[in-house]
Amino acid sequence: MTPAEIREEILDILEDISPDEDLDDLKDDVPFRDQLELDSMDFLDIVMELRKRHRVQIPEEDYGALASMNTTVEYLEPKMRDIVKS
């Protein structure tokens, strides 16, 4: 997957987890928690969705790398490089 495809996938997951949130104005360099009303369970849901959809394993010690869209895409790109978007 390309960085743009990964970004779209994260937006899709965020939309599923927080359907009432307006993601149109999401800033890529600002932490999700500063922009969205996500609690720790919502964050865990993001990690679980990535595992379910793409078999991407994210160790708990790496959760901090998923703070913003930019850091999430940067972290996931090498893990998802060989995944073909269907």
Image (cartoon, helix red, strand yellow):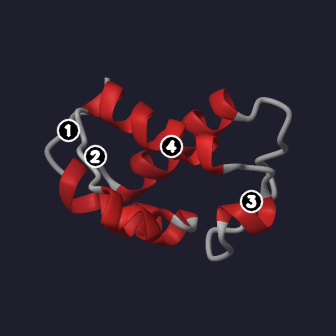
Q: Position of residue 3 (x, y in %)?
A: 38, 58
Q: Which residue is mark 4?
A: 44
CA gap between label 3 and label 2 equals 21 Å
User: Residues at badges 1 and 4 in contact (C-beta under 8 Å)?
Assistant: no
- Number of labels in the image equals 4
Q: Between tags 1 and 4, which lies in front?
A: 4
80 displayed left or right of 22? left
Q: Residues within 10 Å of mark 1 (few under 14, many from 20)?
A: some
Give the image quarter of residue 31: bottom right
Give the structural element (helix, strand or loop) at label 1.
Answer: loop
Q: Between tags 4 and 3, which lies in front?
A: 4
Residue type highlighted by circle 1: Ile
Of pointers 4 and 2, the one earlier in the residue sequence = 2
49 displayed left or right of 20? left
Q: Residue 26, which numbered label?
A: 3
Q: Which residue is mark 1?
A: 83
User: Residues at badges 2 and 1 in contact (C-beta under 8 Å)?
Assistant: yes
Give the structural element (helix, strand or loop) at label 4.
Answer: helix
Residue type highlighted by circle 4: Leu
Of pointers 3 and 2, the one earlier in the residue sequence = 2
